[in-house]
């Protein structure tokens, strides 16, 4: 999100009533809870297991253990 878009959102939220802020907070909380409670078997790019895998790969590349290969087509 660009800075100007973020500032626009902040200006709009600044004019919210107390009840509107509570409703917004409730909806954001529900959305985040639903997002974080997804089935752990789903392959999410930002899942802990994938981030761990990427970090192991980065470490191996930094240690000179990487192997270059052509792109692998997934069908």
Image: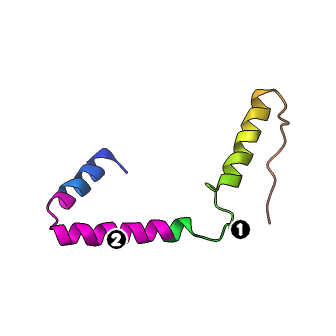
Task: Look at the image and tell me in which quarter the C terminus lies.
Answer: bottom right
- Please give the residue where the numbered disc 1 appears in the rendered image: 41
Residue drawn at point x = 36 percent, y = 72 percent:
27
Quarter of the image for residue 43 reads bottom right
Q: Give the magenta range.
A: 12-33
Element at label 1: loop
Q: Nearer the viewer, mark 2 or mark 1?
A: 2
Where does the image place residue 3, in percent across and percent down from the top left? 30, 45
Residue 6 part of the magenta segment: no
Residue 48 at x, y = what percent?
66, 53
The residue depicted at 75 percent of the width and 28 percent of the height is 62
In the rendered view, does 47 fall on the left or right side of 61? left
Q: Main secondary structure of the magenta part?
A: helix
Give left or right: position of 68 versus 10. right
Q: Tell me the distance, in whole angstroms, between the alpha carbons under discs 2 and 1.
A: 27 Å
Q: Which residue: 71% across, 44% down? A: 54
Which of pointers 2 and 1 lies earlier in the amino acid sequence? 2
Q: Secondary structure at mark 2?
A: helix
Mark 2 Cα within 10 Å, few/some/many (few <14, many 20+)?
few
Image position of 64 (left or right of 29) = right
Q: Is residue 15 magenta?
A: yes
Residue 70 versus residue 16 in the image, above or below? above
Q: Check residue 26 in the rendering and tell me which mark sits there, or answer none.
A: 2
Above/below status of 9 relative to 19? above
Left or right of 36: which side holds 72?
right
Specify the label residue 73 is tagged with. none
Residue 62, placed above or below residue 40:
above
Residue shown at the point (61%, 54%) measured from the top left: 46
Closer-to-camera residue (38/57): 38
Residue 25 pos. (x, y %)? 32, 66
């Amino acid at each position: 999100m660009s800075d100007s878009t973020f500032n626009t959102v902040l200006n709009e939220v600044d004019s919210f009533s107390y009840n509107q802020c509570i409703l917004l907070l409730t909806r954001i909380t529900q959305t985040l809870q639903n997002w974080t409670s997804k089935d752990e078997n789903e392959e999410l790019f930002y899942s802990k297991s994938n981030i761990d895998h990427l970090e192991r790969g980065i470490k191996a590349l930094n240690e000179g253990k990487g192997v270059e290969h052509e792109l692998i087509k997934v069908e």
